[in-house]
Amino acid sequence: MQNQMIYLDNNATTKVAPEVVDAMTPYFSENYGNPSSLYDFGAQIRRVIEEARGQVADHLGAKSEREIVFTSGGTESNDTAIHSALESDPNRRRIVTTQVEHSSVRNLCQAIEKKGCGVAFVGVSKTGALDWEAFERAVTNDTAIVSIMWANNETGVLFPIERIASYVKSKGVLLHVDAVQAVGKIQVRLKNSPIDYLSFSAHKFHGPKGIGALFVREDAPFLPLFVGGRQERDKRAGTENVPGIVGLAKAFSLACERTLPQTSGIEHLRNHLEQTLLAGIPDSFLNGKDEPRVPNTTNITIPGVESETLLIRLSQAGICASSGSACLTGALEPSHVLMAMGHSRELAMSSIRLSLSRYTTEEEIEEALNIIPRVVSELQKFNRTETGIIS
Ligand code: PLP
């Protein structure tokens, strides 16, 4: 066990399920036709894509498979939704989003802001809950779109999407939900929901990288981000990523069959990991405490222990974990999510995220619980020695 890797970074990406690899393989080898070709070898592939689209629509409870557009992943889906809303109504030049979005939305909104569009970045509480009053004030008559995440990639905190959706719709504004960390982890049903656009990405639920989709409500305005060929019913130009589309649909089916019925097991393991770490590491605390969260994620601050050093030491001990800190222009920047939750720079750079999957075993969690407190204690001892406080 000691020399094996313990992968606790499933919010970054997941292992592709073997069944997904099997489903994809023929579309690299014998079934390599272009779906746009007229001959049967191509037309067969077109049918495979439509079957996959139908499965995805069913899993989401969409009204029609026409509401699913395959993209290259979460980032492209997010960009497409925001672009669509802004381009479809030139009189509305405002976006409402939050301070804790994934960089794909955050950086896009900052870039759009520089071009003269208004952007409201709504804040959150110390526990990561949406500042509801600020949110209500932010949604004005000239708002083109509200773009908001369902589950936070760093803390796992869930925003109240139903409440958000009914408020946004009551204001006559378009709603985009970045559900990249929600799909495959919690039930996402769009049947009676007024959500206009919803993004997701296969590599977060045991599918391949480089494939995702955007749900676009039938009557929501749409303008393609990629213009060119007539693929995806003119919604996304470019030859389709056939193995990716097959893999996404298979991974989504497996998530519905296996992960969703198993969430209490994953949550149980996560809670055991979290509670044991919090109890054993002095002064440590949970980010997102008392908020609804996805079942697989925990984010813990360990004051006085730099996450970068901790992650390197954990990696040497065989554990893959991460922090929200990002390496920008050569220097480690604190997590914008934890900063928005009111952490100081030091605390925001002393946090780790551990994220589980349906493949995480009890043995792995027990082994992680042997390793993490020991590594933390060594680092704390070293820090006390360095700062002259020798215990
Ligand atoms: N949105 C969220 C919340 C994410 O966590 C991620 C990836 O980590 C993305 C969007 C981007 O997805 P992709 O990697 O498929 O572009």
Image (tube, rainbow, N blue to C red):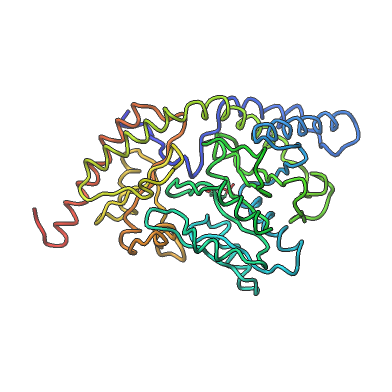
At x 35%, y 27%, the residue is 362
Furthest-left residue in view?
391
At x 67%, y 68%, the residue is 142
Q: Is residue 109 left or right of residue 265?
A: right
At x 76%, y 34%, the residue is 49
Please provide percent x and percent y for residue 20: 61, 28
Of 119 and 111, nearer the camera is 119
Q: Image height check: is 227 above or below 40?
A: below
Furthest-front residue in view?
170
Q: Quadrant of the N terminus?
A: top left
Q: Image height check: is 15 above or below 217?
A: above
Q: Quadrant of residue 7?
A: top left
Q: Image height check: is 84 above or below 195?
A: below
Q: Quadrant of residue 341?
A: bottom left
Q: Decide if residue 40 is in sight here.
A: yes
Please provide percent x and percent y for residue 269: 37, 31
Q: Decide if residue 326 is in sight here.
A: no
Please provide percent x and percent y for residue 82: 67, 58
Count of picture labels = 0
Please provide percent x and percent y for residue 324: 42, 54
At x 56%, y 63%, the residue is 107
Furthest-right residue in view?
38
Q: Is residue 332 left or right of residue 85?
A: left
